[in-house]
Amino acid sequence: MKKLPKVIAVSVAAVLSLGLGACSSGNGGGTTSSTSSTTSSESATTATGNHLTVWTWDPTFNIYAMNEAAKIYQKDHPDFTLDVQEVSWDDIQTKMTTIAQSNQLDQLPDIFLVQNNAFQKNVTNYPQLFADYSQSGIDFSQYPQSVVNYSVVDGKNWGLPFDNGAVIAGYRTDVLQQAGYTLSDFTDISWSDWMTKAKDVLAKTGKPLLSGQANSSDMIMMMLQSSGASLFDDAGKPAIAGNQALISTIDVYKQMVQAGVYTEVNSWDEYVASFVNGDVAGTINGCWILGSIQSATDQSGKWDVTDMPALDGVSGATHYSANGGSSWAISASSPNYALAADFLKSTFAGSTDFYDTILPSSGALANWLPAAKSSVYAQPQAFFNNDAIYTKIVDYASKVPSNNTSPYYYEARDAVSAAITQILGGTDETKALQDAQDTVTFAMQ
């Protein structure tokens, strides 16, 4: 995964606050400012203690959300305090590995954030670090199953989904209008239909519709998941060579690049600049990209959001996918499991007031489906042509197909990224994909 999604920079209000430093203390819980729709009396556990520690990254997004959750929880638990420590994802991963290998489990906080695509691998490799949610009383049916599945191992839930990585297709509606199109012309369409219209837009306006970082498989992975397909079979073995859904996505990608409707750039910064500067007229990515789009204040009112195209001729193809996202883990060594579970249940998995509070300030879009019923989510967004995009995106998230990420997800996507570069350079597709599969098989051994 490219630099930004791999660190899961999911802030959609702040512009890509990434690569945060090592551990430092954040603010504790503040005074109560909101109410919670779920109280501790409904929990399946009996909360004990009054203090929790948390590791997470991004002050404007995850850290902010945690501190706001503390304020809500303090309404019914006035003695509760929360120590949120700023730790980048890369450092959390390093610390988990070190702690597991040294068996110093007491060095973990009570709660820590884990990238969705890395969750299964960490639970599989370091099961001693994680507590499952079986005694939490949390209703996981109130989350999209595809998101829940990221942190399910051996039939148990090991993570609580937080940020929403549902894919959106964002377009400059003023550019579409110049070419004679509206957003509805790009809604619920196939990739072949999209290709025809994108070529027309390019011919009439000189604007490609999409861009992306070269040597990356982000677009491929989003297209692949939209059909419920994966780089692994049901038994967890690599399924890259001969994968018809993957072959179809690569074919579409090749067509886009060769037709000039998809511009490949060299870096993440160049990718963001391509649509912020108006060089391209749209983007398809996880909904956290909305923050980057909105950084172009001169384009307010000229963007809108819809679903992504569906793959032609692929069984199970939909208009919905995901890219990025993360989930809260509870440490198995925490003496405060009951308190941690009740805190998360009462806020991240139980309070519309909480999500109403954090959405306007941070753009933190919920995976918790009841939040979408809030009037705050239904408010028109001026930047996006006064469309109620947040309700729309939560609906998209509920329709994302599940797929098998496997503990070796990153190894597989890196191998596929290399294969795509080779294929675009003229290497035989069958050979490139077989080489990619062999690379992953070797890594798994």
Image (cartoon, rainbow, N blue to C red):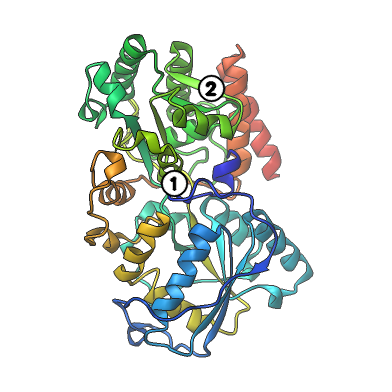
Q: Is residue 165 visible?
A: yes
Position of residue 159 measured from the top left corner of the image (x, y, whole percent) = 49, 64
Is residue 79 rendered to the left or right of residue 304?
right
Instruction: Identify the residue under disc 1.
Output: 288
The answer to which quarter of the image holds residue 385 is top left
> Considering only vertical position in the picture, is 205 above or below 386?
above
Q: Is residue 134 visible?
A: no
In terms of depth relative to the viewer, which is nearer, 220 or 273? 273
> Considering only vertical position in the picture, is 163 above or below 313?
below
Q: Are marks 1 and 2 in contact (CB under 8 Å)?
A: no
Position of residue 206 measured from the top left corner of the image (x, y, whole percent) = 39, 13
* Secondary structure beneath label 2: strand
Position of residue 203 measured from the top left corner of the image (x, y, whole percent) = 35, 9
Is residue 393 rendered to the left or right of residue 149?
left
Please give the name of the residue rendered at 27% of the width and 63% of the height, measured from the top-left corner.
370
> Considering only vertical position in the picture, is 248 above or below 356?
above
In terms of depth relative to the viewer, which is nearer, 36 or 15? 15
Position of residue 235 measured from the top left corner of the image (x, y, whole percent) = 52, 47
Label 1: few (<14), some (14–19) or many (≥20) C-alpha neighbours in 10 Å: many
Please give the name of the residue rendered at 56% of the width and 19% of the height, measured from the top-left corner.
430
* Secondary structure beneath label 1: helix
Name the residue type under label 2. Glu
Label 2: few (<14), some (14–19) or many (≥20) C-alpha neighbours in 10 Å: some
The answer to which quarter of the image holds residue 442 is top right
Instruction: Identify the residue under disc 2.
Output: 264
Is residue 149 rendered to the left or right of residue 129?
left
- Identify the image quadrant of the N terminus: top right
Name the residue type under label 1. Trp
